[in-house]
Image (tube, coloured by chain):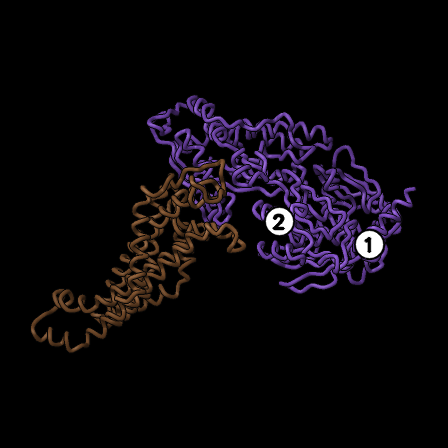
């Protein structure tokens, strides 16, 4: 394992532990408004200062990290499973099924996904709790983000379909689901893993984009998207540098995922 | 002695680098949609109309009183249907064509032509029938309307007079400036009108400025940055964040003129056919429920925390800044969660383990929608969320893209509560007829009622019609004072804050006295002067 990969793993571990231990590390609830101290600089009471309406920025960063880091992999898992189901099965079956699946994939790829997300979100029921809104946001990302992975998986399954390996297996009497489960899925695993890893930063950034537009996770629940929105009014890096912490975290985590992913690809 | 003082001041101004003339620069946030003053609907076109159009009367943005311009005097008939203007003599359009009553007649005919669909003309449409303009003499004209028009004389502040006889009608103006160059998407240059009729106390021809350059720039960050670099001279309608940022480095350049006419408010959906549960509709239609929510909101905190102190708790539909029309007897709902709970108990609401429940045990929870991207409204919603938590009410804040929001509040009515703002440019309450009449589309809490569904809405309808048909300002004021009182008692809109009018003026500009009414910084454009380029840097 290279030093860079070790460092990336260490960063992810530290960030995940800090996020999971938010209850212990945070000094205040993420929603509590200290209205006498809005926009306060770092102090003993608020190590990263407070936001525009006086909420402890450290608490919000920790809880926001927890939400983004737990739900982005969930959304990635959902989209990878959908991609495997649509792309993998279509590639394996070939013929009309492959053409139909690829037409559907092309349709999804051609959609302006950000506008689609905004439209879908506008159609959702209004009276949902912030927690449900978080889950819904990431579910939407997962359900709409499978198309690119499906195309890759379809190509992988197609090459397997015509391979000598499967020809030999068929000759030995393996067919249907058993053949798919024993030989196809294990051989697609490196692609599935790569697609899973590559989707995580994509979904983190997608949620951040929605958050910046004010359409992400509902208040008062924090997420990286809503935290990054705070940077909107920042004119220089020297102006309240502690506000850059969520951005630094996002860069570190996405870069770490990419480093690990590229190593996985080499290994695969 | 006075002459010596003025000579001395001119000398000092010259020594300091002030030179009457020069070019004033500021930004338009959008492309002007039209240069036809009768078709103005957007802010950018309104700016051009204000700077280039000559009007018969002008509402002084500082005193809020009507002053003569192209008309030296005017007389309103007792029934409010007729107005007679005595026009100023010796005035010419920018192309040299003389101004007369024919031009006023031509403008009125154009404005009231149904084929033109003039938004300016809409304000004058009072009933079925035609508007007659009768030229009594080259400097005297009478205009008669089919029905009384409320605040008729005030409405002429928006009517820029067109030329009836100029060969190039579009370019002939009576205002202080005229359009010289327009580069779509980039800039608009206005040059001084050499034939402008006004002079200053010493007999010097106005305006002092040679030109105005309007850069089309929708990005506020860039606008502020350019102002800081000295590339712009004015910024109107600053946000409180930009204001404080500028104030931290150059406190002498920013101006807080106090509460403006703009308000921020929330309301509950009371539409009978709205797809919301019946028990919630019952809450929203209860005056006690609405008043209790109003009492549980800490407006002082909204002003101080969300707007950094650059807003005032709102009292009612009319801002305290509207000197004549504001009902001085009104008081804002004092922040008191206890009083709110007491009010709720009158309707059978009760607290159970920290959750407010109605008489049949439903937990009080509702969603509030507002437009995504408006950080001030998002922050206000979050503060209100915490305020209402203190009386056991749970709010879900939902931010939506603007088209979805409008679709919900005006077509599907699929929402529970909404928060939006109202930009008011008109001092006269007649401009709010479309909000207060129960049959109106903009009667947001329950639009287009076939007949008033409550006694108080029926009373508002009656009072609004009364004030619209009366010509006596005192009678109109009395009727509208009662409207304000009913609105405060019934709280169909829960008014939150009035934003302050914030602006920035470069040190190079002399004579600017920013006010709350638009255009805040350049309302006295003819009398502004600017330093030379060297001094500007």
Left or right for B285, reference B171? left
Residue sitting nearer the eye, B440 or B330 = B330
The subunit carrying tag 1 is B
The subunit carrying tag 2 is B
Report how far apart the C-alphas of labels 2 and 1 lie in the structure: 26 Å
Q: Quadrant of the N terminus of chain B?
A: top right
Q: Quadrant of the C terminus of chain B?
A: bottom right
Q: Residues within 10 Å of mark 1 (few under 14, many from 20)?
A: few
Counting from the top left corner in percent of width and height, residue A197 is at 29, 62
Left or right for B248, reference B469? left
Left or right for A121, reference A175? right
Counting from the top left corner in percent of width and height, residue B274 is at 43, 39
Residue sitting nearer the eye, B211 or B470 = B211
Which residue does the image show at 69% across and 63% down from the upper left? B182
For residue B78, say whether it is visible: yes
Residue sitting nearer the eye, B215 or A180 = B215
Q: Secondary structure at mark 1?
A: helix
Which residue does the image show at 43% across and 35% down from the upper left? B386
Counting from the top left corner in percent of width and height, residue B209 is at 78, 55
- Chain B is shown in which shade? purple
Instruction: Return the residue found at the far bottom.
Output: A164
Left or right for A9, reference B179? left
* Residue B251 sits in quarter: top right
Q: Is residue B515 above or below residue A148?
A: above
Q: Which mark is residue B15?
A: 1
Q: Which of the two discs, 2 and 1, labels the residue nearer the N terminus?
A: 1
Q: Residues within 10 Å of mark 2 (few under 14, many from 20)?
A: few
Q: Which mark is residue B249?
A: 2
Q: Which chain wears brown? A: A
* Residue A94 sits in quarter: bottom left
Q: Secondary structure at mark 2?
A: helix
Counting from the top left corner in percent of width and height, residue B400 is at 45, 48
């Amino acid at each position: 394992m290279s030093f860079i990969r070790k460092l990336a793993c260490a960063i992810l571990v530290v960030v995940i532990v800090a996020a999971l231990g938010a209850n212990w590390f945070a000094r205040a609830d993420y929603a509590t408004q200290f209205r006498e101290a809005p926009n306060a600089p770092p102090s003993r009471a608020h190590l990263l200062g407070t936001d525009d309406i006086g909420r402890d920025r450290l608490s919000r960063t920790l809880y926001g990290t927890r939400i983004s880091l737990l739900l982005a992999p969930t959304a990635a898992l959902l989209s990878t499973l959908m991609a495997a189901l649509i792309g993998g099965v279509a590639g394996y079956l070939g013929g009309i099924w492959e053409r139909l699946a690829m037409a559907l994939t092309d349709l999804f790829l051609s959609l302006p996904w950000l506008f689609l997300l905004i439209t879908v979100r506008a159609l959702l029921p209004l009276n949902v709790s912030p927690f449900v809104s978080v889950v819904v946001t990431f579910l939407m990302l997962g359900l709409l983000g499978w198309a690119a992975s499906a195309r890759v998986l379809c190509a992988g399954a197609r090459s397997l379909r015509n391979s000598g390996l499967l020809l030999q297996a068929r000759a030995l009497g393996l067919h249907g689901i058993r053949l798919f489960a024993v030989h196809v899925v294990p051989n697609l695993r490196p692609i599935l893993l790569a697609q899973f890893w590559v989707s995580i930063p994509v979904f983190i950034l997608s949620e951040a984009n929605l958050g910046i537009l004010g359409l992400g996770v509902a208040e008062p629940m924090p997420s990286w998207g809503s935290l990054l929105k705070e940077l909107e009014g920042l004119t220089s890096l020297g102006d309240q540098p502690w506000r850059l912490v969520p951005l630094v975290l996002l860069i570190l985590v996405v870069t770490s995922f990419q480093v690990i992913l590229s190593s996985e690809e080499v290994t695969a | 002695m006075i002459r010596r003082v003025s000579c001395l001041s001119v000398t000092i101004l010259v020594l300091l680098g002030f030179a009457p003339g020069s070019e004033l620069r500021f930004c338009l946030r959008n492309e002007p949609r039209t240069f036809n003053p009768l078709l103005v609907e957007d802010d950018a076109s309104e700016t051009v109309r204000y700077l280039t159009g000559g009007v018969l009367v002008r509402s002084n943005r500082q005193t809020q009183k009507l002053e003569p311009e192209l008309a030296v005097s005017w007389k309103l008939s007792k029934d409010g249907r007729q107005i007679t203007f005595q026009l100023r003599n010796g005035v010419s359009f920018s192309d040299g064509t003389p101004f007369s009553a024919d031009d006023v007649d031509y403008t009125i005919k154009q404005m009231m032509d149904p084929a033109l669909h003039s938004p300016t003309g809409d304000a004058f449409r009072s009933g079925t029938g035609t508007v007659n303009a009768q030229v009594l003499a080259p400097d005297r004209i009478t205009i008669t309307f089919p029905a009384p028009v409320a605040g008729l004389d005030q409405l002429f502040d928006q009517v820029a007079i067109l030329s009836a006889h100029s060969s190039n009608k579009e370019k002939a103006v009576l205002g202080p400036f005229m359009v010289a160059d327009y580069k779509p998407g980039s800039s608009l240059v206005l040059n001084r009108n050499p034939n402008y009729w006004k002079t200053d106390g010493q007999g010097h021809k106005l305006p002092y400025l040679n030109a105005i350059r309007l850069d089309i720039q929708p990005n506020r960050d860039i606008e502020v940055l350019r102002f800081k670099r000295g590339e712009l001279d004015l910024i109107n309608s600053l946000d409180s964040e930009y204001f404080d940022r500028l104030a931290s480095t150059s406190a002498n350049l920013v101006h807080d003129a106090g509460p403006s006419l703009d308000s921020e408010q929330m309301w509950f959906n009371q539409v009978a056919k709205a797809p919301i549960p019946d028990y919630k509709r019952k809450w929203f239609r209860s005056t006690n429920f609405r008043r209790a929510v109003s009492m549980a909101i800490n407006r002082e905190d909204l002003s101080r925390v969300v707007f950094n102190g650059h807003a005032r708790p709102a009292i009612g539909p009319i801002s305290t800044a509207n000197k004549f029309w504001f009902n001085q007897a009104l008081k804002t709902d004092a922040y008191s969660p206890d009083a709110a709970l007491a009010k709720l108990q009158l309707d059978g609401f009760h607290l159970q383990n920290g959750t407010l429940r109605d008489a049949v045990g439903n937990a009080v929870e509702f969603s509030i929608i507002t437009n995504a991207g408006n950080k001030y409204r998002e922050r206000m919603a979050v503060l209100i969320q915490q305020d209402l938590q203190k009386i056991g009410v749970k709010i879900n804040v939902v931010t939506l893209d603007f088209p979805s929001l409008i679709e919900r509040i005006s077509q599907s009515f699929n929402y529970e509560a909404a928060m939006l703002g109202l930009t008011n440019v008109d001092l006269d309450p007649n401009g709010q007829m479309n909000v207060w009449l129960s049959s109106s589309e903009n009667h947001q809490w329950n639009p287009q009622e076939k007949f008033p569904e409550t006694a108080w809405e029926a009373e508002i309808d009656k009072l609004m019609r009364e004030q619209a048909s009366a010509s006596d300002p005192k009678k109109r004021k009395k009727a509208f004072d009662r409207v304000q009182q009913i609105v405060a008692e019934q709280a169909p809109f829960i008014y939150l804050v009035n934003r302050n009018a914030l602006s920035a003026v470069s040190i190079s500009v002399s004579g600017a006295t920013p006010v709350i009414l638009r255009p805040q910084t350049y309302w006295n454009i003819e009398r502004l002067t600017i330093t030379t380029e060297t001094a500007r840097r």
